[in-house]
Amino acid sequence: MSAKPDLIPGIYNYCDRWCERCAYTSCCLQFQIESEDTSSGDALRGFDALNARFWEEMGEALVQAMRLIREMAAQHGIDPEDLDKETAFSEQEESFHRNAREHPCATASLVYSGMVNEWFAAVDEFLEAEESLLTNHPLSLDEHIQVIRHYQYFIYPKTVRAVEGRLNESSIAQTELQSDSNGTAKVALIAIDRSLAAWSVLYAEYPAQEDKTLSILLHLDRLRRSTEVVFPSARAFIRPGFDS
């Protein structure tokens, strides 16, 4: 199967492990192996096209999320200029002489996963609904809640792996754009971007939880910028298939 011409070598190394939303399942060896039906190539191509449009819409939502963060920060007395200067979870001259799981970006990622659970619990308590928002929510929010829940526990292990990779890389490897740590950090950043976009939608839908949602948006934004400080070349990493 690895010799099939339509497969993209190594595409599964830097993906978000969400095959149902992937635009390249028909080109992925890992998906072909794991799929129960590897003969439905035509159906997969139609499926891919549908989800490519979904991620384009999420990209537009991310732009709106970043605008929202700055507008809300200003309303709460936070200088928008400071958002660009602050490194929050990391320092400009970062020391990697610590366990990857204790790294500020890793711990912030873990904190975020807990913030998500707290937010949904708070909404359920406020609405006093018999069913949780996770299982009983407006159809219009289904896609966005799926995005939040899929990446909730995804960002932390990817961040830890990226930091561990940087710890184990030689000084020469750390300067290489196509290092594994950069690729892994890029996947984590993409997950953060998409989570930010989804949360911006929920912010408008649940005004009673405005403060909690804004806290999550600001936390994710600081995590995003901190990760970019620690891995300044991550965004430029070229993932097989996705970026080339």
Image (spheres, grey):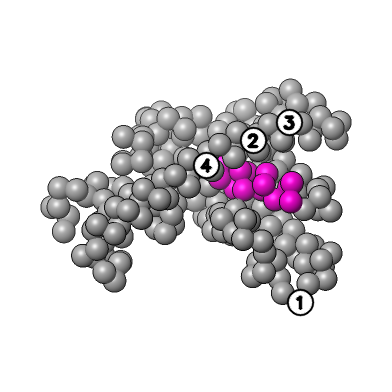
Question: Label 1: which residue?
Answer: 130
Q: Can residue 160 be seen in this view?
A: no
Secondary structure under the numbered disc 2 in the rendered image: helix
**Amino acid under disc 3:** Arg
| Dot label at residue 57 | 4
Q: Which residue is drawn at 71% across and 56% down?
A: 115
Task: Please name whichever residue, 201 or 96, is drawn nearer the observer in this view of the structure.
Answer: 201
Whichever of labels 3 and 1 marks the residue nearer the N terminus, that label is 3
What is the CA distance from the residue labelled 1 to the residue labelled 4? Answer: 32 Å
Question: Label 2: which residue?
Answer: 64
**Mark closer to the observer (3, 4):** 4
Specify start and end residues of the magenta stretch as a single range.
192-205
Residue 68 position in % (x across, y down): 71, 35
Please state if 233 lies on the left or on the right of 31 as rendered: right
Q: Which residue is drawn at 71% across and 71% down?
A: 132
Secondary structure under the numbered disc 1 in the rendered image: loop
User: In the rendered picture of this protein, how many numbered marks are placed on residues?
Assistant: 4
Asked if the residue under mark 4 is in contact with the one under mark 3, i.e. CB atoms within 8 Å, the reply is no
